[in-house]
Amino acid sequence: MKNLILKTEEGDLFRFTDTEERTELTIGSKRTADIVVKSQYVEPIQIRLILKNNVWYAEDLTPEDAKSEVFLDGRRFKRPMVKFDGVLSIRRAAKKEKADIVRISAVKQFSRKKPKNNFDLTAKTITTVGSGEGCDIRVNNPLVSEKHFFIVFDGQNCYVEDAHSVSGTYVNNKKVKRQKLNDYDRLSIPSAAYIFYRNALLFSTAEGGIRIDAVDVCKRVQDRNARGKISLVTNVTFRIGAGEFVAVVGGSGAGKSTLLDCINGMRPATDGKIYYDTNDYYENMNTYKGVVGYVPQRDIMHDDLTLWDALRYTALLRTRADLSKEELSARVNAAIADVHLQGKERLRISSLSGGQKKRVSIAMELLSDPKVIFLDEPTSGLSPDLDMEMMDLLKDLSKKGRTIVVITHAMENIDKCDRVAFLGRGGRLCYYGAAKDAFRWFNRRSYSRIFAALADEETSEAFAKKYRRTDYYKELYGQLVEEYGKGCCLPPEAETENEAAWEKAPKRLPRRVRTARVAAGGGTAREEAAAAQDTRESGEEET
C-alpha cells in the first residue's frame, strides 16, 4: 500500500497517498527534500524511503565522514537498506549522549476498504461519544465516562475535545484535551478505537475479544556470568484468535512467564512485534488501559474484608468516578456471577478456599470489563477437581467474548483450551495446536516425556523448525506478510526429504508385552526400567 503518513517529534505530518506516482521520499537538509531537517549536521539528502512490493524501506545515504548517523529504533543500520518498521532518528556522530536531531515515525495506515461502520460528523455541529444514553456514539464500558469526548465540526474541519473524562482521550496514542483531526488519525478510549477519515469516524469495538499476533518475538537479557546476552524467548510467531482460550506450557525455565509478559507489555520484547487487532501494542499501550487484565500467580487482596467489600473497593479504584451506586453494585454483582461465587458475598476473604480466592482475583479484573485476560498459574496449588472447575470457568469467560491466555503446569484439563503453545529450551515455540494432537506431534506417550525432550536445546530447535514447516505456519506467514509487510518474521522452513531421527517413534516393545516378560522374570534391565516408568505413568494420558 502506497499510503504513508510520517510524523516528527514536534507532531508535523507528511502525507504520501495512493494518488502519487512516485515511489521514493527523501529526508535531509536540502530545500528540495520531501522532509527538510534544518541542521548543520544533517546531509543534504541523508535518508531515502523506497516503496518495493507495497513495503516501505529506508536507505541510509550517510557518507563515511558525515557529522551525523542514522538509526532505526535506536540501532545503527545493519545494512544500507532496511524495512521501515520503526522510528528513524538522526544523531550527531561525535556526541556521547546521542541526542536526536530529529525523530521520524510512520502512522499506521487504515485500509481503504469500504468500512462497515461509520458515523458522519458533518450532520451535527457537536457529536458526543460516551457511555450515557444520550450520546450519539455509545460505548458501554465502566471506564468510559458518561460524556467522554466531543467532536466539533465548524463547517470545514473537525476538532476532538475531551469532556474531562477519567480515562482520557487519545489521538495517535497521545492524550489530548483539544486537537484538530487529520485524515487517518486514530482516536481511542477504553474498549473502542476510531479512525478519522474525510469528516467521518470509522470505528470498531472489541466486543468479541482481541486478536493477538506475536510476530518473531525475541527477548534477550544480559548474562550475569558472561559478557554476552542470553535468549529467553526466541523467534516466537503465532496468532491468538479473538475469544480463544490459549495455554502456554513448558518445562521449568522454558520462558513461559517471559513470553506472557512480552505479550501483555509488562516486559516488552527486545525484537519482534506484538499486535492487538493489527495495531502495534507497544506503541498504543496507553489506549488499551482497562481493556487488558492480568491475574498474577499470587493472590493480592485483604483477608479481613468480605468478598463484597473487596470487590466494591476495587471497583471504586478501577472504574470511572462518576459511576452511580446502582451501576457500581451492578458491576460487582456481575463479576461475582461470572466467577460463580453467588452466596459468598458476606464471607471474609480469609475464610475462602484457595480456589475461591483465585476466583476473587479473576472477579477483580472483570470489574473493568477487559477484552483480554492473562493469568499466571491460576490452578497452582489446587486439587484436581478444583483445577477442572477453574479451567471450565476460564473456558466460559472466553465464550462470553474475552481472549484468555493462561500459563499452567497442570496438564490434566489442558484439553479444554482451544490451542496449546509448547515452549522448549530458549523459549522456542515447538508446537501450537490442539492438546490432543501433542502426543503424536512429539512422538511421546506423556507430557513429562515431552517436557524432558524439550529441555534439550538441539531438540527444541528441531521441533521449532518442524513447526515452521506446518501448513498452519505457512498460511499464517502469508497473512502476516500481507498485513505487516515482508520480513516481519522467519519464513517457513524448507521441507526435508527424510524423516529426522528425533522425529521417529522410540523403539520399545508394546507395554503389555514388556510387562508380561518382566513379570515372568525374563525381561532385560532396560525393560525392567521401562516397566517401572510405565507404572509411574499409569495415571497420565496416552495416545
Image: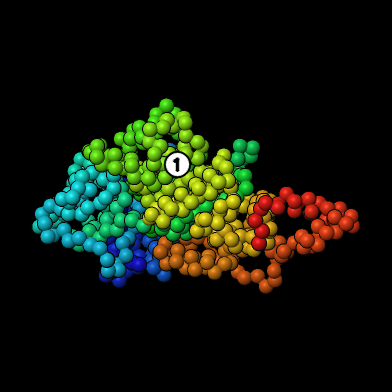
Query: Disc 1 on helix, strand or loop?
Result: helix
Of residues 497 and 118, which is closer to you in this image? 118
Residue 77 showing in the rendered view:
no
Q: Is residue 204 left or right of residue 491?
A: left
Image position of 505 with respect to 10: above or below: below
Of residues 181 and 168, which is closer to you in this image? 168
- Number of numbered labels in the structure image: 1
Which x, y percent locates residue 532? 78, 50
Amino acid on which disc 1 is placed: Arg
Say which quadrant the N terminus sits in. bottom left
Which x, y percent locates residue 78? 51, 55
In the picture as drawn, the residue positioned furthest to the top comes out as 304
Which x, y percent locates residue 453? 68, 54
- At 37% across and 45% down in the image, what residue appears? 337
Image position of 16 with respect to 142: above or below: below
Q: Which residue is mark 1?
A: 359
Of residues 11 and 362, which is closer to you in this image? 362
In the picture as drawn, the residue positioned furthest to the bottom comes out as 497
Which x, y percent locates residue 539? 67, 51
Q: Is residue 148 left or right of residue 356?
A: left
